[in-house]
Image: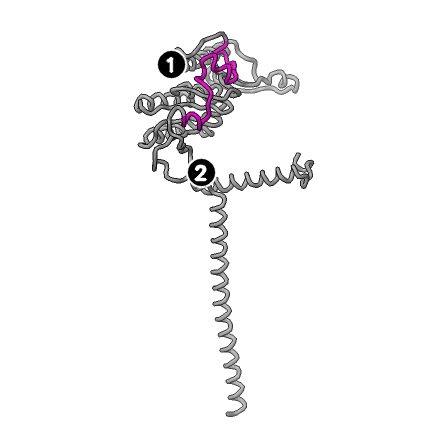
Amino acid sequence: MSGKESDQNWEKDTVEALAWEGVKEQRRSRRWGIFFKLLTFAYLAFFLWAFVDWEATGDLGSKPHTALVELKGLIAEGADADAEEVNELLQAAFEDKNTKGVILEVNSPGGTPVQAKAIYEEIMRLREKYPDTKLYAVVSDLCASGGYYVAAAAEEIYASKASIIGSIGVRMDGFGFQKVMEKLGVERRTLTAGKNKALLDPFAPQDPAQRAHLQGMLEQVHQLFIDDVKAGRGDRLKESEGMFSGLIWSGEESLKLGLIDGFGSTDSIARDKIGEENVVSFSPKKTVFEQLTEDMGAVMAKTLNRLWVSGAVDKAMLY
């Protein structure tokens, strides 16, 4: 073999060896890539398993239970207690063949009259449709205004002695900036087609006729509220001066006024009134992402609290 042929063979062998090493390196990279993907998936699976309350998304109707529907926060469209969503949950609770009774757990400052009345009327409809399934309202911290409007539709209302109950009234808020505008020398220019189109304009003086009109409207809505409370509570109400004036009372005083029927919690009412201690929540189920972020936030808050108490975190940083 000539020297030239030997050089050519060496070059060929070198190229083949380099190519083969490149193939083997690609295979190794692919295997490591698969390994790290599997490792990441396993980590995420463990993370989700650790943080998500899988029991909350389980089978609701597998055995006899007390159905729990929560009404928390503002009662308004798109808010925490949207009437459409609450009513769907109530319907599901009553329709479940294993529901022995329903508890509406209330913690609400109120909301819009329309949304509160919609839930009130749906409860009344469901009670009539399912006469053997009792619905009890249980108040935690607050059951005021629209929250009490809804609770009044229940078979009975229970609360803590320290709960806040009442505020049977209607309000409309606004501000007047006329004097501020005058001091600033700002001229308000508003064009309207319709004498009262600029109703409640905060930059104009209040019109007595418009005020009287709005007051009359509020009185009508207030009377609807009163009528529904009386219809729901019946002769249990011990009407007194101020009962429908918007005042609030403690749970202990509310019992004397007939605004509630006694003291109790969700567990005690499920056990003593419904006779079924197995409580199943019919509240909206969070998505995995919502549950995950909520639980992560709770864990972070607890961690910061521990650091705060131990002095490991400079408290000035958290102001």
Residue 19 lies, with reference to residue 67, above or below; the image says below
Q: Is residue 131 visible?
A: yes
- Res. 85 image quadrant: top left
Find the magenta span and give its range.
242-271
How far from the left and from the top, in percent, is residue 63? 34, 35
Q: Quadrant of the C terminus?
A: top right
Please check the rendered image and state whether residue 243 is part of the magenta-colored stretch, yes or no. yes
**Which residue is at the front of the view, 247 or 3?**
247
Residue at the disc numbered 2 = 286
Residue 28 lies, with reference to residue 53, above or below; the image says below
Disc assigned to residue 231:
1
Disc assigned to residue 131:
none
Tell me what residue is drawn at x 38 percent, y 24 percent. Answer: 135
Q: CA distance from mark 2 to mark 1?
A: 36 Å
Mark 2 or mark 1: whose residue is earlier in sequence = 1
Asked if residue 29 lies left or right of residue 66, the reply is right
Tell me what residue is drawn at x 47 percent, y 46 percent. Answer: 49
How far from the left and from the top, in percent, is residue 51? 49, 43
Tell me what residue is drawn at x 47 percent, y 12 percent. Answer: 257
Give neighbour class at mark 1: few <14, some 14-19, many 20+ (Cα, 10 Å). Answer: few
Residue type (three-letter) at the residue carrying disc 2: Lys
Residue at disc 1, secondary structure = helix
Asked if residue 33 lies left or right of residue 129, the reply is right
Tell me what residue is drawn at x 44 percent, y 24 percent. Answer: 138
Asked if residue 176 lies left or right of residue 77, the reply is right
Q: Count the marks: how many? A: 2
How far from the left and from the top, in percent, is residue 54? 43, 42
Residue at disc 2, secondary structure = loop
